[in-house]
Image (cartoon, rainbow, N blue to C red):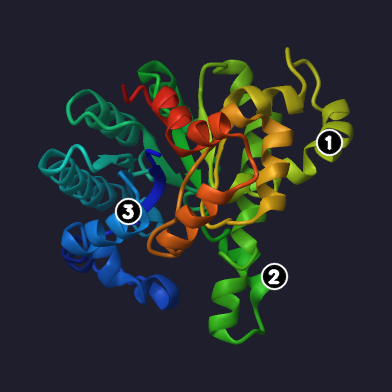
Amino acid sequence: MKIIALEEHMLPRDIIEAAGVDLGIRAGKKAAELDDLGEERLRIMDAAGIDMQVLSALSYFVQGLEPELAVDVNHKINDRLAETVTNKPDRFQAFAALPMSDPIAAAAELTRCVEELGFLGAMIHGQTNGIFLDDPSMRPVLQAAARLDVPIYLHPAPGPEIVQEAYYSGLDPEVAACLSTSGWGWHSECGMHVLRMVASGVFEELPELKLIVGHMGEGLPFHIDRIESMLNPVVTGHSLSVAETLRRNLYLTTSGYNFDVPLLCAIASFGVDHIMFSVDHPFADSKKATTYLETAPVQPADLEKIAHGNVEALLRMN
């Protein structure tokens, strides 16, 4: 079975160090693996049976830099991604990293990456300096994605500083770093971000905009009926209900989740055509992810969709 992994991170060490960026406690431990775009990454893919990775920079460290620096650093990261794809197009494709502190420049960079470099979309990491994607200032990026007919992969990122202080202060630094990110915090943060976009009418204005989220939907499949019953009555004037909008515009990946219950919940809530495979390399184990995928309790035809068919259709890879 062909397997395409959709949320697979990289971050070139030389570019990040030159920009003076500190990766912090958790990402810093993975710096070497993030930097590797060569034989070791391919060895891991081959051992797990992964045919292709769609690469994305772990760019929440750089998307919110001072605008001029953000433009320069993200441009260099995207050129490195493009070089990697050019060298092995049968094994790698890419999502663009965008300088979100300058939305006009970010829209231009997305256009460059898609039209000139052949990228398949972009990955944006949460809010940028406290500004969420539903803010009118961010509309140029969303409009560019809709015009180019490419998705935005909305990856979680740490919340604004005021949230970090309120929820995670007083804890051991390593515990706080985990709890505020992959241990819980950024899943709820990302799910809330998606709902902001729905509630504010982003998808009414841009009904063709496609959004991807990882980690089996960032909690949205489990909560979708509650969201519909509580939020929909106060989100008025839209052509579709909140749940209908989510099911039309949102796509989910499995990244980091290798369990029956969340997979079956995601399929039941969004339909199998909106579910795609991911590992979350290097923060999750590739072999564990593919082993689970191959034994997941779904029909063979649906398994093929999750493993490669849905992403090929969404990203027009054929």
Q: Answer left or right for 20 relative to 315.
A: left
Pointer 1 residue:
225
Labelled pair 1, 2 in contact (Cβ < 8 Å): no
Number of other residues with Cα within 10 Å of mark 1, as a class: few under 14, some 14 to 19, many 20 or more: some
Marks 1 and 3, the one that precedes in the sequence: 3
User: Which residue is depicted at the point 55% across and 48% down?
Assistant: 254
Residue 72 image point, x, y percent:
20, 48
Q: Residue at x 24, y 61 (%)?
A: 43
Numbered mark located on residue 167 in the image:
2
Question: Which mark is first along the chain, 2 or 1?
Answer: 2
67 left or right, relative to 64: left
Q: Residue at x 40, y 39 (%)?
A: 1
Q: Residue at x 34, y 49 (%)?
A: 50
- Foreground: 82 or 295? 295
In the picture as drawn, the residue positioned furthest to the bottom comes out as 172
What element does badge 1 sit on?
helix
Q: CA distance from mark 3 to mark 2?
A: 27 Å
